[in-house]
Structures are given as C-alpha cells and as structure tokens.
Image (cartoon, rainbow, N blue to C red):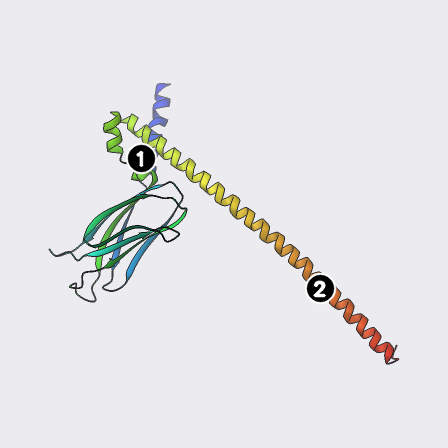
C-alpha cells in the first residue's frame, strides 16, 4: 500500500519540477541599427523576472539599451549603455508586455550583429526556491511538494484567467450574432418594402398608361 502511494507522489513531484521550469531562454541578434523586441501575454498580479547579458567573442562587449513597457505603454524598466542586467516587476495590467533591446555602442562594427541572451521567467518560475528552502528549512520531497503546490496554484489561476477570457469572448460573440441577426432582419424588411413600393409604382404607371 505504501509503495502504491509513494510512486504517484514521485510522479507528481516530477511533473511539478517540469511545470516550475517555465522560464524562456531567448537568444536575440541585435542589428547595428534597429530594435529587437520580445513580448508575452501575461495576466495581472504575476511576478516577472528577467536576466540578460551581451555575448561577445572578444574582450570588449558592446553596450545596449533596454526598455520594458506594459500593455498600456507604461514604462516599467529602462537602462542604457549596459552589457548585462536584470529587471523585475509585478504585472498590474493584463495583456502583452514588451521588452525591447537596441545597440548603443557606436564603436561597434557596422553590418555585424550582437547576440543577447535573455532569461525570461514568469509566475512560479520566477520564485526563488533556494531562499524558500533555507527560510523554512525544507528540502527533498517536501520542497518538491511545495513546488507542486505552487505549480497547481499557478495552473488554477491560469484556468480562471482563461475562463474569464472565454466568458468575455462568448459575450462579445453573442452580441455580434444578435447585431448580425437584427441587421439581416432590417435588410430583409428594407428589401420587402422596396419591392412592394416598386410593384405599386409600376402598377400605377401602367394604369395611367391604360396598359392594364
């Protein structure tokens, strides 16, 4: 009996570890002139943590600038003339969050690209589990269970978010269908009235000409 319980427990821990690793490691190639941006649709009250670093083949790493904006255009982070850095924030708006990178080192050779590694983490993946383990003095299976609990909470919040989005889309769809139905009825009514008036006019015209 104990073996039957322990096996699902380890399976759940394995999937919890897989769910926690939802960070995105992105490679960006910045041109000599221009901007490269990445975006992600995130709901409200979600922690976002990102680390970035310029990867260079030589000793002198070119400098870049970074700007992060919210869905409504609010500036969340802005750094200039750096080779590495980090930004973190908690979302207060639901929508696409945009992080843009561009080259500011004018001494860099024209026509060549600069590589930037971006480690983008959101939600449960942005949590510092090492600090949690040290603070609460937990490790091993207990720590994995805490990760599983956090992953389940994150999934539950995502499901609630998707349910709300689905309800909004369904309401919009129903309103659109109602408007289309009324528009079709009005169009049909206009066509019937126009046809009736046309028949009446032609009948009177032929009666005046004594053709009928």
**Numbered disc in front, either 2 or 1:** 2
Quadrant location of the C terminus?
bottom right
From the viewer's perspective, is residue 209 above or below residue 87?
below
Quadrant location of the N terminus?
top left
Q: Quadrant of residue 156?
A: top left
Q: Quadrant of residue 9?
A: top left
Residue 190 tag number: 2
Q: Quadrant of residue 190?
A: bottom right
In the structure shown, which secondary structural element does the residue marked by tag 2 occupy? helix
In the structure shown, which secondary structural element does the residue marked by tag 1 occupy? helix
Give coordinates of residue 162: x percent, y percent.
Answer: 46, 42
Give coordinates of residue 123: x percent, y percent.
Answer: 34, 40
**First in residue order: circle 2 vs circle 1:** 1
Horizontal side of 176 relative to 201 (left or right) equals: left
Residue placed at 72% from the left, 61% from the top?
189
Give coordinates of residue 106: x percent, y percent.
Answer: 18, 64
Mark 1 closeness class: few <14, some 14–19, many ≥20 residues within 10 Å: some
Residue 195 tag number: none
Residue placed at 20% from the left, 50% from the top?
84
- Is residue 50 something that shows in the picture? no
Disc 2 from disc 1: Cα separation: 63 Å
Residue 17 tag number: 1
- Is residue 131 something that shows in the picture? yes
Give the total number of marks visible in the rendering.
Answer: 2
From the viewer's perspective, is residue 166 above or below residue 101?
above
Residue placed at 65% from the left, 58% from the top?
183
Residue placed at 29% from the left, 37% from the top?
127
Give coordinates of residue 105: x percent, y percent.
Answer: 18, 61
Q: From the viewer's side, name the closer residue of 15 and 37.
A: 37
Horizontal side of 36 relative to 59 (left or right) equals: right
């Amino acid at each position: 009996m104990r073996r039957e319980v322990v096996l699902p427990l380890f399976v759940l821990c394995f999937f919890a570890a897989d769910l926690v690793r939802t960070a995105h490691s992105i490679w960006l190639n910045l041109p000599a002139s221009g901007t490269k941006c990445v975006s992600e649709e995130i709901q409200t009250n979600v922690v976002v943590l990102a680390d970035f670093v310029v990867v260079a083949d030589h000793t002198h790493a070119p400098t870049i600038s970074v700007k992060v904006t919210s869905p409504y255009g609010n500036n969340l982070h802005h750094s200039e003339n750096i080779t590495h850095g980090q930004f973190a924030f908690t979302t207060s708006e639901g929508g696409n969050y945009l992080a843009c990178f561009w080259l500011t080192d004018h001494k860099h050779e024209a026509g060549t690209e600069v590589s930037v590694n971006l480690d983008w983490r959101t939600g449960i993946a942005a949590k510092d589990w090492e600090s949690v383990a040290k603070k609460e003095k937990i490790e091993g299976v207990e720590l994995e269970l805490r990760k599983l609990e956090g992953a389940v909470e994150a999934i539950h919040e995502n499901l609630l978010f998707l349910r709300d989005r689905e309800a909004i889309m369904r309401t919009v769809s129903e309103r659109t269908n109602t408007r289309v139905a009324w528009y079709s009825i009005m169009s049909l009514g206009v066509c019937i009235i126009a046809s009736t008036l046309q028949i009446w006019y032609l009948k009177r015209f032929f009666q005046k000409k004594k053709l009928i």
